[in-house]
Amino acid sequence: MKALRDFLDKIKPNFEKGGRFEKLHSVFDGFETFLFVPNTVTKKGSHIRDAIDMKRTMATVVLAMIPALLFGIWNVGYQHFEAAGSNPEFWTIVGYGLIKVLPIVVVSYVTGLAIEFFFAQIRGHEINEGFLVTGMLIPLVLPPTIPLWMVALATAFAVIIGKEVFGGTGMNILNPALTARAFLFFAYPAFMSGDRVWIAEKADTFSGATPLANAANGELAANPDFFDMFFGFIPGSIGETSTALIIVGAIILLFTGVGSWRIMLSAVAGGLIMGLLFNLWGANEFMTIPAHHQLVMGGFAFGVVFMATDPVSGSQTNKGKYIYGFLIGFLAILIRVFNPAYPEGIMLAILFMNVMAPLIDYYIIQANIKHRAKRAKLKTT
Amino acid sequence: MGKVVKINKGLDIPLKGKAEKTITPVEALTYALKPTDFTGVFPKLLLKDGAKVKAGTAIFYDKYNDSVKFTSPVSGTIRAINRGPKRVIEEIVIDPDGNQEYETFEQANPQDLDAAKIRETLLESGLWPAIRRRPFDVIARPEDEPKAIFISALDTHPLAPDLSFIAHGKGKEFQRGLDALSKLTNGKIHLNIKAKDKNSGVFTNAKGVQINEVHGPHPAGNVGTQINKIDPINKEDIVWHVNVQDVITIGNLFLTGKYDATKIVALTGSEVKKPQYYKLINGASIEPLVKNNLINDHVRYISGNVLTGSKIYDKGYIGYYDHQISVIPEGDHYEFVGWAAPGFNKFSISKTYFSWLRPGKKYRIDTNLKGGPRAMVMTGYYEKVFPLDIFPMQLIKSIMIEDIEEMEKLGIYEIAPEDFALCEFIDTSKTEIQSIVREGLESARKELM
């Protein structure tokens, strides 16, 4: 490693102010800090620091998504061969899945990182690791049949309009990955909904409808059983189908302390309660779906674990997180059942609550301010 | 009986190098008074270099509060006045003459004195600066009357000395000090002690104070935490606080009429061969403590603890308020893909490194920043180590945008930079939170004081 370090030290001056490649400073810095934790020492304040940094945090989130990604790769293959009526061996399925999924992941990362590097350079700050997560989230919430140019377009839209115009990482109001998905959903609905898009190169005779679509059409009988949906042997977006492996990701996030248990817990509670309320009402077939089935259908689990917990776009106060999470779960099921045009209620629920989060925080903080002011008044009387 | 305060949010950072409980007296070759220890003080010198001083001779005063004098801890000669950038006075170095002579001050039982006389004695002897105030975390103003005085009899910072051990056998001086302080307020004196500390007789026998028990991890020992939980500061309230050893020194002043700046400090940290306690005179050079007593020579010397202390050099001087010296390794090295390593040896409050597999392990943590500065992304994180009834991130952000009205509403009056030291320690975005808090306090102080 010494040789690599020496090489970096040798070429470093070229990338600094006045150097030949000054304009690539952020790119160099990005690669250098990727390879080596910098030798910076503490200057002011606490002399020692916790070992965690943004790279470790984001790497942990990416790690938590890997089980869902790997399953997604297999499932894309499995659904394709299932629809074609053939039953090849494991590696053939995975190979097919890789061919479909990997390009989407690569396009998402390359487009997003290029834009990130560009903005970091013109703004003169270090490259933020947040996109490592966004770049993985985007492919996982898209159908496997999505054209690659759309992936690039949506990623660019999400990073520029969803994040950079607000000031970059840490300043955005909406979750960037969901912004990408919503952009595609409304701009190219034919590629993002219906029965044709969820299975790659599907034979026309095969249904291919997602459980949510079946439910919305009142064809509940066509749905697989609970455990098929729970383990994810169903058509859907690449990473969203296996609730079981999303739970594995959730455990990683919660155990390491990176994800918010408050949001996850309250969102699941919100979803369950709305589901139970619909069960009581039971006006149509969708409402009769058992509440726990609602949680394993569509993108609910994925959204709750990986999207709702985004610390930037979510509620920032601990009390607020309970309200924010609960309403996401509640609204996701509400939207899904009441408006069959948008079966993916979780996406709209999270985006809506992203917008509402600052308002929730405002009231939580005002309550604290008021109670402190009251403390002063009690004292004087 | 006082209150029982239980803190759950907080963190005890498990460091190597706890001081062994033996006390060795040491004499240093030089001593110094450092105006930089006193935030907000603009020093005006009363003496020039070469002047002879006794212990208790005033050397400078504060331009903005000219009754507040700062006096020499030893008798000897002023050897040098060291200035830093912009000619700021950093150190006034004094060579001791070997036979400690003292200025004489009022020697009386404080119970027989009135507040004015006690105030005057403290101001003249140079012990007034030992009294600090909230809001703003600066030296108290003599004209104020606080609603309460807080004394924390426990220090929960990493490797901090055991104050019961330090105060042992000084019950009489401590009580005298309390008696003097109690004349300065109509409110209560809160003496906050460690729960279930059997060796704290000096504290538990104290009279004329409210004794509160404090449980929990750091920052349970910070006065900021204690004030917030016991008698919070509201608008226009003033609370004072004094360190335990300074109460003893104040008591000693009224017992003997002398400013005896002797105190006990703990030499701690992973790089010290024999971490232990030393008895020395305030402002002593740390040279006799650390010379030939280190495992490694690429180290950082800190007057104070690793979270809030100030960086000094190998012959530097112990700070006015500090009772601890920490020596830890410098971390100016690169680490190949360190952020992706399993990290069995990396301490983190999160469980993102596998050091969680080794509970009870003590760490040798160096000064590396362990990452680069980033935008604030994580939320709900500071709250894990911040027990005050205040929103830490929102307050920090209000300071960053310089919104004084918002800072006021969010609780800037109650806090000091040290209350945010743990937030700074665990911060994934590596923001210099304590400096930000100090800037906020200073801008609010300039506006309001």
Image: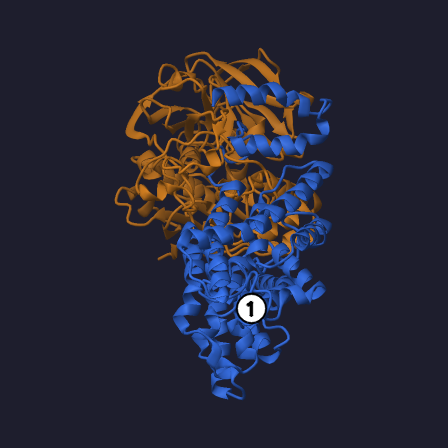
Chain colours: A blue, B orange
Nearer the observer, B384 or B33: B384
Q: Position of residue B133 (x, y in %)?
A: 55, 44
Nearer the observer, A200 or B18: A200
Could you tell me if residue B47 is visible in this image? no
Q: Secondary structure at mark 1?
A: helix
Give the amino acid at mark 1: Ile
Q: Is residue B84 positioned above or below B111 on the image?
A: above
Q: Position of residue A303 (x, y in %)?
A: 53, 62
Disc 1 sits on a residue from what chain?
A: A
Q: Residue at x 66, y 34 (%)?
A: A26
According to the image, label 1 marks what residue?
A328
Nearer the observer, B400 or A262: A262
Q: Is residue B61 positioned above or below B448 on the image?
A: above
Q: Is residue A9 left or right of residue B368?
A: right
Q: Is residue B341 positioned above or below B235 on the image?
A: above
Q: Is residue B164 left or right of residue B113?
A: left
Q: Quadrant of the C terminus of chain B?
A: top right
Q: Position of residue B290 (x, y in %)?
A: 39, 19
Label 1, residues with CA under 10 Å away: few <14, some 14-19, many ≥20 = many
Q: Quadrant of the N terminus of chain B?
A: bottom left
Q: How many labels, in total?
A: 1
Q: Position of residue A52 (x, y in %)?
A: 48, 41
